[in-house]
């Protein structure tokens, strides 16, 4: 494949609003706009002015504990208002916030690895352990921030804010460790400012908007929307994935920052409730479920299938998909006036992309997140960060004639059949997810004669015979090497709780394969190959760990 390029920077750099220093170094006096959040099972809210004052009080306590400019403050807890206050407090001291995945690390190890000055945890059992006075219960931040009446008291004086230079570090991202030890990357102020400027250019978040954030705020991009509220004057709501829909119904957001899995689950729930089939009726039902004021929906982090995208777009509720990595931040984004369903949008002005000779997407930036990991295994930097400063994504895709980028899968998603045919399985998985009984799926087949899948059922009482018939029909529409001649019906839906999806609802392909390895073997054994090397058209379905197969060949065919 020849090299292609898109999104080249044009002309001199455009001045960018310094959102980070605005949030960090100025007093917010906005009493009109608010942050809404859940506490003790109830929805509460603060004016942005009160949020800012509370953050200053927390900053004063951090300063008294020895935190200074460029020191790192770790937060290892689920979403809660204290998380937001700690992050804003660190900014007000010119310090660095490190978001750490909870329930996965020991405090002593995290303190040492990331060089933290303090660590706040949502697990009180970690407080007072071998890490000593450096580990604090995040619950105490509430008392630091609020008086007995539950409102911020007068904000104390802080030392003069040193101000961040564009190349300074303001956050540490901990990357996903699903394929190995987590890596740590330090984030430059310039990259945050430029990404926020690009979002503002596309979506113009403003007075009247309320942005709902429910993904973990340990992911830096989720905190962008809090910075946006303080800088641009709009509401913001903090929830979690369990209460996201309930919170949306209560506070009526105009924008929801979600992932495809969230919208897929909402679609399934609405269809189960028997919403009207016509687009207008469906749009009204979506709006009612989400509070009635949705301007648009944001999605990314994992591929969104066309079925989910059309479900919302055709109903008049835009679902705008984008693309980015921890190492690049936002690279492309669909937005009002420039979207194409199925694509991840056009390249942002400060980004540029190209494909190398192997078809792998390479991303460059005028304001990079960074050009290296600070914490990683040997060889990881060389694998991802090129000498040019670009990032090798290991994603495979293409750009259409109008400049819209399509992500077709990852190098890791290529399955090589025993006949040496290479199959990009996400394309097959997307078609399989369109079948009525399938909520999610993972396709396998490396070194095998044909593809198989593990199916996460849409309902507990999945009709296996019907699914086998639907799969046989789908096979007729696929290329021969893409066809699925056997599948396993999982014993429970893929979820974050059972470790088969990550926190961003992405498939955990390796754990799925390991958990259902024996069932996949049974499926292959049940669906034997003819002497001439061909495979029968009727797929075999087996139920995980028990139960007879559905469909497949007759006993005579198997001999």
Image: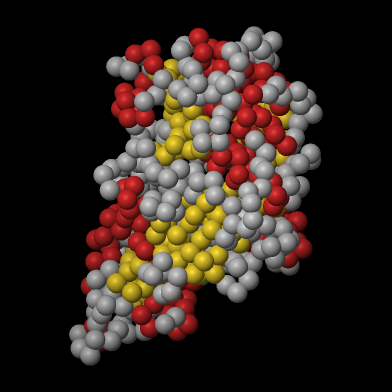
Position of residue 118 measured from the top left corner of the image (x, y, whole percent): 42, 20
Position of residue 516 measured from the top left corner of the image (x, y, whole percent): 30, 58
Q: Is residue 486 above or below residue 206?
A: below
Q: Is residue 126 above or below residue 351?
A: above
Evaluate whether residue 531 shows in this view.
Answer: yes
Position of residue 84 measured from the top left corner of the image (x, y, whole percent): 57, 28
In what quadrant of the picture does the N terminus appear?
bottom left
Which residue is found at the position 47% from the left and 24% from the top? 70
Which residue is found at the position 51% from the left and 32% from the top? 168
Q: Nearer the viewer, residue 415 or 437?
A: 415
Q: Quadrant of residue 253?
A: top right
Q: Is residue 468 left or right of residue 351?
A: left
Q: Residue farthest to the bottom?
A: 532
Q: Is residue 220 left or right of residue 339?
A: left
Tally of numbered tags: 0
Which residue is found at the position 36% from the left and 25% from the top? 115
Q: Is residue 535 left or right of residue 391?
A: left
Which residue is found at the position 34% from the left and 13% from the top? 132
Position of residue 381 measured from the top left corner of the image (x, y, whole percent): 34, 47
Q: Nearer the viewer, residue 494 or 181?
A: 181
In what quadrant of the picture does the C terminus appear?
bottom left
Colour mapping: secondary structure
């Amino acid at each position: 494949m020849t090299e292609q390029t898109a999104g080249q920077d044009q002309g001199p750099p455009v001045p960018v609003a310094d959102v980070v220093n605005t949030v960090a170094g100025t007093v917010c006096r906005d009493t009109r706009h608010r942050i809404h959040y859940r506490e003790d099972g109830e929805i509460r809210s603060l004016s942005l002015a009160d949020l800012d004052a509370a953050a200053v009080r927390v900053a004063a306590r951090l300063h008294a504990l020895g935190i200074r400019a460029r020191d790192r403050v770790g937060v290892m807890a689920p979403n809660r208002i204290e998380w937001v206050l700690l992050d804003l407090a660190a900014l007000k001291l010119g310090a660095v916030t490190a978001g750490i995945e909870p329930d996965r690390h020991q405090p002593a190890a995290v303190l040492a690895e990331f060089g933290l000055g303090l660590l706040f945890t949502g697990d009180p059992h970690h407080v007072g352990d071998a890490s000593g006075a450096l580990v604090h219960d995040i619950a105490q931040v509430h008392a630091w921030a609020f008086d007995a009446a539950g409102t911020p008291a007068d904000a104390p004086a802080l030392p003069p804010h040193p101000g961040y230079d564009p190349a300074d570090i303001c956050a540490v991202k901990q990357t996903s460790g699903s394929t190995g030890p987590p890596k740590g990357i330090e984030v430059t102020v310039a990259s945050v400012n430029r990404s926020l400027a690009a979002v503002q250019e596309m979506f113009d978040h403003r007075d009247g908007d309320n942005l709902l954030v429910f993904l973990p705020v340990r992911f830096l991009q989720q905190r962008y929307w809090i910075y946006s509220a303080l800088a641009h004057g709009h509401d913001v709501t903090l929830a979690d994935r369990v209460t996201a829909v309930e919170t949306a119904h209560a506070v009526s957001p105009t924008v929801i920052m979600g992932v495809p899995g969230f919208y897929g689950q909402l679609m399934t729930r609405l269809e189960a409730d028997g919403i009207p089939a016509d687009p207008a009726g469906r749009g009204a039902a979506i709006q009612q479920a989400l509070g009635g004021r949705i301007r648009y929906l944001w999605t990314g982090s994992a591929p969104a299938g066309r079925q989910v995208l059309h479900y919302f777009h055709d109903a008049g509720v835009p679902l705008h998909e984008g693309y980015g990595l921890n190492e690049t931040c936002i690279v492309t984004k669909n937005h009002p006036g420039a979207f194409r369903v199925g694509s991840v949008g056009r390249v942002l002005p400060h980004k540029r992309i190209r494909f190398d000779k192997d078809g792998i997407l390479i991303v460059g930036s005028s304001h990079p997140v960074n050009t290296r990991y600070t914490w990683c295994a040997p060889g990881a930097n060389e694998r991802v960060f090129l000498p040019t400063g670009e990032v090798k994504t290991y994603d495979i895709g293409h750009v259409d004639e109008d400049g819209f980028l399509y992500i077709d899968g990852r190098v890791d998603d290529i399955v090589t059949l025993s006949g040496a045919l290479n199959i990009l399985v996400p394309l097959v998985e997307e078609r399989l997810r369109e079948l009525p009984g399938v909520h999610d799926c993972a396709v396998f087949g490396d070194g095998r004669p044909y593809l198989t899948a593990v199916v996460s059922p849409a309902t507990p009482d999945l009709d296996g015979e019907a699914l086998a018939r639907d799969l046989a029909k789908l096979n007729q529409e696929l290329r021969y090497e893409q066809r699925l001649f056997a599948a396993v019906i999982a014993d429970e839906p893929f979820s974050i709780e059972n470790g088969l999806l990550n926190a961003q609802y992405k498939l955990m392909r390796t754990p799925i394969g390991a958990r259902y390895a024996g069932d996949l073997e049974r499926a292959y054994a049940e669906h034997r190959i003819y002497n001439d090397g061909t495979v029968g058209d009727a797929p075999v379905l087996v139920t995980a760990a028990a139960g007879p197969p559905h469909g497949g060949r007759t006993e005579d065919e198997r001999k």
